[in-house]
Amino acid sequence: MFVVIFGRPACPFCDRAKALAARLESAGAIEGHRYVDIHAEGITKADLEKTIGQPVHTVPQIFVDQTHVGGFTEFDRYVRDNALMSATV
């Protein structure tokens, strides 16, 4: 399982998503993760909307194995629902 997080600088939810992904990776619950700074990469919300297929109002936007999960709240729920959280304890 590989996680990709699209975010921006100074975004607290982006930081939380990166920290959760790092904990999951350290625990061996996921194979790895990548953080993409949308400002540094020149990616717009419109670009993300084309990829996701729905409007994007906030970041982070998170993908697990190329499937869009949502923002941090949805990613956290995904981790809990799939019993990945126990790997972080």
Image (cartoon, grey):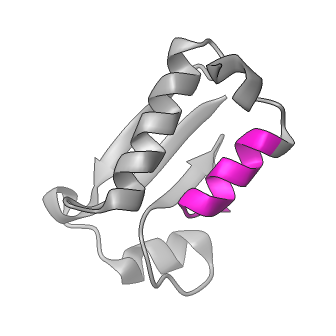
Start and end of the magenta stretch? 67-80
**Seen in the image, is 42 located left or right of residue 62?**
left
Residue drawn at the location 75% of the way across and 23% of the way down: 86
Q: How many marks?
A: 0
Residue drawn at the location 41% of the way across and 68% of the way down: 59
Q: Quadrant of the C terminus?
A: top right
**Seen in the image, is 58 located left or right of residue 82?**
left
Counting from the top left corner in percent of width and height, residue 16 is at 43, 48
Tell which of 21 and 35 is nearer to you: 21
Tell which of 19 and 65 is nearer to you: 19
Quadrant housing residue 82:
top right
Magenta span includes 76:
yes
Q: With respect to residue 23, does 58 lie above or below?
A: below
Magenta residues, dominant SS class: helix
Magenta span includes 33:
no
Judged from this view, the residue extending furthest toward the left is 40
Residue drawn at the location 50% of the way across and 79% of the way down: 49
Counting from the top left corner in percent of width and height, residue 57 is at 46, 85
Quadrant housing residue 70:
bottom right
